[in-house]
Image (spheres, helix red, strand yellow):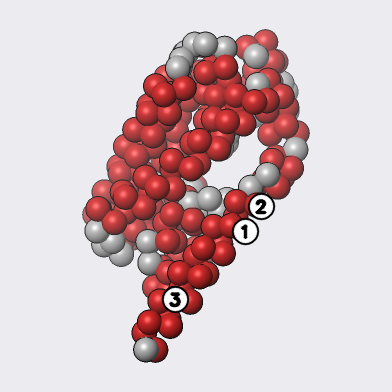
Amino acid sequence: MQNWLLSLAESSQLDPLTDLLGHFLVHNGIFAPMILLLFEESGIPLPIPGDIYIAYTGYLVKTGKISYLLAFVLLLLFVLMGSSILYVLSYRYGHTIVLKFGRFIHLDEKKLDTVEKHFRKYGPLVIIFGRHVPGFRIPITVFSGMSKVSYKTFIVSTFISVVFWIWFYLSIGQSLGVKIFHLIHGNYTYLLLLLIPFIIFFGSVALMHANNKQGKQKN
């Protein structure tokens, strides 16, 4: 694994930041993916997605460098800490973040409007399910802070969402080991196909919840 990551990091096809992150993962043990997840959830743009950090931790579990329970708990804590930091910053300086840093974190008014529209219709379910949509984890956190969604609602919804996310990618990392990095690096869209059954399932649950809510309002 380390040899492959080093060769990936040293590849001329990668930019210097990705090169640096690859070396950081290899040489800083079990806390490297945790720290990078903390940065990403805090809104710091990184070229490697958080899914890979979790999958890498799954590989560390498989090799016996960390127990599954400890890995799960640490990942959960670091993700919640990072998202909480961004929530607080957005609560206080949301508009400034969008105007000055939006282009760096792939955040714009259109994404925020999309989140707001669905939040009005589905409430906290948007936080729970929306975080699994590529490109919407950060906008959802920023929206939650800017729109003054209560911290309790935000953190509970994020917790529910993150538990599934961590379990899913830890399992992939454990099952596929080194192959997961080849798969993600070369065919990331194929990996997303693995999520389709879950997206359909949870989407159906959200739709039924919305229909039930509308039915009650009519009655």
- Residues tagged 2 and 3 counted as in contact (Cβ below 8 A): no
**x then y, percent, for residue 92:** 24, 54
Which mark lies nearer to you, 3 or 1? 3
- Residues tagged 1 and 2 counted as in contact (Cβ below 8 A): yes
Quarter-of-image position of residue 154: bottom left
Give the number of the disc on residue 200. Answer: 1
Badge 3 crowding class, 10 Å Cα cut-off, few under 14, some 14 to 19, many 20 or more, is few
The residue depicted at 48 percent of the width and 51 percent of the height is 131
The residue identified by callout 2 is 196
The residue depicted at 40 percent of the width and 47 percent of the height is 160
The C terminus lies in which quarter of the figure? bottom left
Marks 3 and 1 sit apart, C-alpha to C-alpha, by: 18 Å
Quarter-of-image position of residue 173: top right
Residue 18 vertical position relative to residue 147 in the rendered view, above or below:
above
**x then y, percent, for residue 62:** 57, 17
Residue projecting furthest to the bottom:
218
Mark 3 belongs to which amino acid? Asn
Q: Secondary structure at mark 1?
A: helix
The residue depicted at 43 percent of the width and 40 percent of the height is 163
The residue depicted at 49 percent of the width and 56 percent of the height is 129
